[in-house]
Image (tube, grey):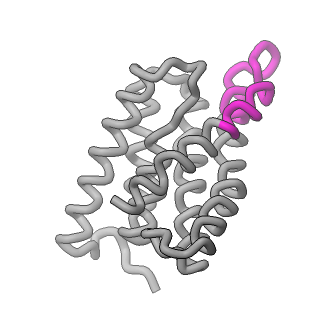
Amino acid sequence: ATRPIAAYSMHEWRIAAILFASYFATFGLGSRLIPPSAMLYPSAAIALTALFFGGLRLWPVVYLAALAGSVLGGFSTSFSIIFPIGETLQAVAAAFLLRDLRLDPLFRRYHDTFLFIAAVLIVSVIMPTFASIGNWISTPFYGKGFSGWEHAYVATISALLLLGPFFLRW
């Protein structure tokens, strides 16, 4: 059984504060410094790593950091509501899957590498789908809607494959 948020230990509160600050800073810097055409999401790898090591109980921190980043980043209201849900669900699904498969974060076996790649390919569907829904809701008749889904999918895979192992081993 999981404990309520108020029952976080002092250690978990420290991890939560570090997670919030690093996710929020990375999201803010990424949205300002990385051009939109690059579509690289380093904050997704931070969320995955934090939930993998810190436990799935930290999911509210990912949600709040994603919400704060999208609201302060000036995104539309509908996108700011839907984006944090997708980001959190993706991080929770990836961390759950990797923990359930007993991934060794040092990747000492080929098996761990293949598990990580397979998990990333599966969970990377979540965020682009939620982002496309957010775009469609904000401009249902004139917006891009789902037209950029494949680019967001490749970008999510790239971010998780490039940065995920780095953060997991670090």
Residue 20 appears anywhere in the view: yes
Measuring from the top left, give residue 41's x and y in whole percent.
51, 37
> Which residue is at the far bottom?
1
Residue 56 appears anywhere in the view: no
- Please tell me which residue lies in front, 54 or 163: 163
Residue 110 falls left or right of residue 164: right
Residue 133 falls left or right of residue 1: right
State the residue at coordinates (58%, 62%): 94
State the residue at coordinates (32%, 53%): 19
Magenta stretch: give its range.
132-154
User: Which of the 4 image quarters holds residue 134?
Assistant: top right
Q: Is residue 22 above or below residue 35?
A: below
Measuring from the top left, give residue 106's x and y in whole percent.
43, 69
Measuring from the top left, give residue 63's x and y in whole percent.
45, 50
The magenta stretch spans residue 95: no
- Please tell me which residue lies in front, 163 or 47: 163
Q: Is residue 21 above or below residue 30?
A: below
The magenta stretch spans residue 148: yes
State the residue at coordinates (71%, 28%): 137
**Which quadrant does the C terminus fall into?**
bottom left
- Please tell me which residue lies in front, 115 or 138: 115
Measuring from the top left, give residue 21's x and y in whole percent.
27, 45
